Every structure is written in structure tokens, then in C-alpha cells.
Image: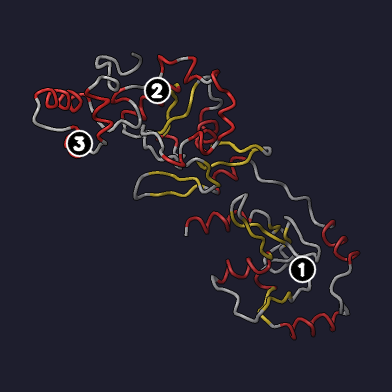
Amino acid sequence: MQKQRVVQDRFWQRVDQSNGDEACWLWMGATNEGGYGIFSIGTRRDHKYYLTHHLALVFTRRTTIPEGKLIRHLCRNRLCVNPKHLLFGDRFDNMADRKRDGWHDGWSPEIIREKVTARKRFERPSVEERFSAMILERPEIGCWEFGGSVRDGYPRLSIQGKPVNAHRISWKLEHGSIPDGLCVLHHCDNRRCVRIDHLFLGTRSMNNLDKVAKGRHNSPKGDDQLLRKRPWLRKFGFFNPAYTHRERRPRGEMHGNAKLSWPQVRDIRIRYADGGISQSSLGQEYGMSQRGISLIVRGDYWRVEDQSIGG
């Protein structure tokens, strides 16, 4: 319901209602070749266009259009979305209207051009207005979630054609610019949240430490791995920081894919050294393969216990 409210708010922002409730409410957004207003619903990659006079009636009457029915304009203005000027009908009613008005073939290109260009210029709402209209309050979790398109879990808003993460916009609207080298972090760990008291500034290192402290540092596996999703990153080759700064690579239990902790590793080595248990049995107990246990007891894996990085 909240997402539907965001869509409706975005819709009515493009309607000129300045002439009063009884006059035509002109659609100020995009139009199709027939002179009807159109409105896009969905994401940038997956969206669908709808006729605006259809949406106006659906939004105000909270109903759907019956099968076999269409919506007639009593005012004969295709750009009008005033629900008082709209009425359900069928194609025979529509043909009768066109015949009565002398528009057997619909609006001519000249009439469409005249109607569309006669509208007031559509003034795009400010960033603050667009941003506020897309906030969804979630009292059950205490967050204010942003209802825009999402990438990597973060909702975004397009500003001058460039997508910007919504939580960064929230911080800028409240506090101004973000200093170079700092990130906007979440106290609530909800990437969709834009509530200003849930946000704070920090460095990238602080962000990574916060992620580890909250147990969200496990690396993706399988086809979700970064280089599988974005193979073009391999072009960096030996200039990749994984090679040029080996001391920064997490090791031991700090590694995102670690299945064991140092106490478990010590227990494996002591029990295998004492004898009486095989590597396969230890692997079954700790959820690992026989080969993984072999690499641990030989010291090829988990070599440096006193350092979480390096070694």
C-alpha cells in the first residue's frame, strides 16, 4: 500500500489542477502519438506505460477497469485526468462520441499538437519534494524506507540524470555536503532506511569494521562472487590490490569464507596428533572435506594464529 501511495504521489505531481475542481485537470507529463497522457510504472529496466486517464479513475475510485470497458472523456479533452470528467463505457459509446463531435478518425495531428503545446510548461518538482514523496515510514521497525529503484540493496534517486544513493541524499539535505573520504553509514543496518537519526558519517575502514562486528562480512559464494558477476574487473590483473597489497588480505577466522575458528583449528591438530581419529572423521564432525583437514594439520592452511591479517 505504501509503494502504491508513492506511485500515486508521483502521478498527481504531474497534473495541473490550478483551474479548480470542475475544470479539466491537464496531464503535464509525457503523451503518446494519439494525444493521450502516459505514465510509467516500474523500474528503469522493467517498466510499463499506462494511459493517465485510466490511472486517474483507478486511483480515485480504487477499482479496476471491467473487462471489455474503456474510459470516455465527457469533456472530450484527451489530456484531462479529472475523475469528474471520466466515465466507463464501451467502444460503441466511444464511437458515438467521436461521431457526435465530428472526429470520426480521432484527433488530427494538428489538434494533438495544438492541445499538447498549449499546456503550461511542466515544472519538475525539486529534489526535496521528490525525495519526501517517496519515503515510506515503517513504524514496526522504526525506519523510514525509500521507495525508489534499488541496486545492490540501496535505493536510489536520479538527480540530473545520475543515480544517487538515497541515504546520501538524506544526509546532504539535512547537513549539507559529505566531506571527501567519508561514507554515510547506517546504525540500523537497513540499506533502504533514510531516517536521518539512523545515519552517521564514517570512513570506509569504519564501515568495514562495523560490517565485521555485526556479522555481515561473509563473502558471496558461487555465481554471486564479484568476479563472476563482473568479469571485466579481471582486466586489472596483477595491479589488483589483492596482489599489490597482500598484507591487507583477511586471513584465518577474519576471512569471509572461514568455516572454523582458531580454537577449533587447535582442537583438530591436537586430536589428530594424539591419534585414534582419522581426517575423514574430523571432516565430518566439522563440516569439512578430508582434504581440508589434511591442509590444516600439515600447516598449509591456518598458519598464523596471532594475526588476523598478513602472514
Q: Nearer the viewer, residue 227 or 153?
A: 227
Q: Is residue 246 above or below residue 24?
A: above
Instruction: Check disc 1 and give the amino acid type.
Output: Arg
Q: Is residue 293 above or below residue 151?
A: above
Q: Is residue 248 left or right of residue 105?
A: left
| Disc 1, SS | loop
The mark found on residue 280 in the picture is 3
Q: Is residue 179 above or below residue 39?
A: above
- Which residue appears at 73% of the width and 74% of the height? 73
Q: Nearer the viewer, residue 5 or 75?
A: 5
Q: Residues within 10 Å of mark 1 (few under 14, many from 20)?
A: many
The mark found on residue 181 in the picture is none
Residue 167 coordinates in the image, percent (x, y): 50, 36
Q: Is residue 185 left or right of residue 162?
A: left
Q: Residues within 10 Å of mark 2 (few under 14, many from 20)?
A: some
Q: Tell me which colouring the rendered structure shows.
A: secondary structure
Residue 200 coordinates in the image, percent (x, y): 42, 28
- Which residue appears at 63% of the width and 66% of the height? 55
Q: Is residue 139 left or right of residue 277?
A: right
Disc 3 from disc 1: Cα separation: 76 Å
The mark found on residue 206 in the picture is 2
| Disc 2, SS | helix
Instruction: Check disc 2 and give the amino acid type.
Output: Met
Q: Nearer the viewer, residue 160 or 126?
A: 160
Q: Is residue 107 left or right of residue 293?
A: right
Residue 193 coordinates in the image, percent (x, y): 44, 41
In this rendering, the label closer to the viewer, 2 or 3: 3
